[in-house]
Image (spheres, grey):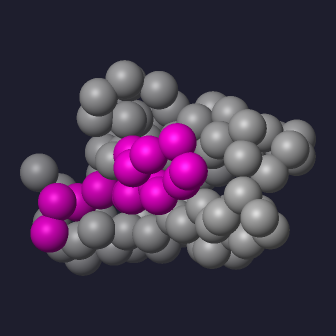
Amino acid sequence: MPSETDFIASADATLAAIGNLEIDCDDRGKLIVNRHVPNREIWVAARAGGFHFRAADGIWRDTRSGEELAASLTRLLRAQAGIEIDLSGLPSPGI
């Protein structure tokens, strides 16, 4: 498991690339992206559920499905907000 400092630096770089960490989808609710330091994960709360992403092999991966963070966010934003956004350039975790 990475140190807390290393995790925070990697997570913050990814979150900074996303920009807005709370996305208001009007009447479809909010999509929230944040870091969870105790578990060393990035968490996503969406209408479709809660998702936890952990650094694995240089990629933020969903701890249940294995889906990559950028792909997951793209899918969730399409479903919840009806928008298409390319997040393939998100920084890889440096941990």
Between 9 and 22, which is closer to the camera in this rendering? 22
Total tally of numbered discs in the picture = 0
User: Is residue 94 toward the left or the right of residue 69 in the image?
Assistant: left
- Magenta stretch: includes residue 9: no
**Dominant secondary structure of the residues highlighted in magenta in the image:** strand
Q: Which residue sits at x=29%, y=28%? A: 64
Residue 81: x, y in percent? Answer: 80, 51
Residue 53: x, y in percent? Answer: 36, 45
Q: Which residue sits at x=29%, y=56%? A: 41
- Magenta stretch: includes residue 46: yes
User: Is residue 10 toward the left or the right of residue 74 in the image?
Assistant: left
Give the magenta-colored segment's residue range: 38-51
Between 61 and 6, which is closer to the camera in this rendering? 61
Residue 65 visible in the shown view: yes
Q: Which residue sits at x=38%, y=24%? A: 66
Between 37 and 72, which is closer to the camera in this rendering? 72
Give the answer, above or below, for where 43 lies relative to 56.
below
Give the answer, above or below, for where 59 lies relative to 35.
above
Residue 87 visible in the shown view: no
Q: Which residue sits at x=77%, y=64%? A: 27
Q: Residue furthest front?
A: 27
Which image quadrant for residue 17?
A: bottom right
